[in-house]
Amino acid sequence: MGNNYLEFRVKSYGKSDLAMLYNPQMSVREALRLLMRWIVRNEALCRELEEMGYRKNSKILTPREVEAITRYLGEP
């Protein structure tokens, strides 16, 4: 992971957009599926996101949610 050209910024992201930052070599659908699998398998991250009001069907991640995800998964 990691992009040598642009510095990652914590801000609102569409789930698909964040997924593609983590896995640019994949299709959008595959990247999103993998990101969601990483989130679901990380119980502490799941719990923290739920406490923030995260809903798995939401299309947009808030800056707080993105910050939590990158804290657990690392920056894309």
Image (spheres, grey):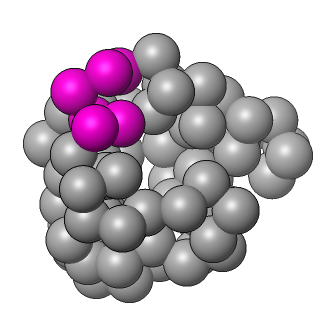
Q: Which quadrant would residue 25 be assigned to in this image?
A: top right
Q: Residue 23 placed where, x, y %?
A: 59, 38
- Residue 37 or residue 51, whichever sits in front: 51
Q: Which quadrant would residue 9 be assigned to in this image?
A: bottom left
Q: Residue at x 81, y 35 (%)?
A: 30
Specify whether 55 is left or right of 42: right
Q: Residue at x 74, y 35 (%)?
A: 33
Residue 46 to residue 32: above or below: above
Q: Quadrant of the N terminus?
A: top left
Q: Residue 67 placed where, x, y %?
A: 18, 60
Residue 67 to residue 46: above or below: below
Q: Residue furthest top?
A: 41
- How many marks the image carries: the answer is 0
Q: Residue 18 placed where, x, y %?
A: 51, 60
Q: Residue 13 placed where, x, y %?
A: 47, 76
Residue interval drawn in magenta: 42-47
In this orientation, does residue 62 appear? yes
By secondary structure, the bulk of the magenta-drawn segment is best described as helix
Q: Which quadrant would residue 62 be assigned to in this image?
A: bottom left
Specify whether 71 is left or right of 4: left
Q: Residue at x 32, y 21 (%)?
A: 43
In this orientation, does residue 74 appear? no
Specify whether 28 is left or right of 8: right
Is 43 colored magenta in this rendering? yes
Q: Quadrant of the C terminus?
A: top left
- Residue 20 or residue 63, whichever sits in front: 63
Q: Residue furthest left?
A: 71
Q: Residue at x 45, y 72 (%)?
A: 61
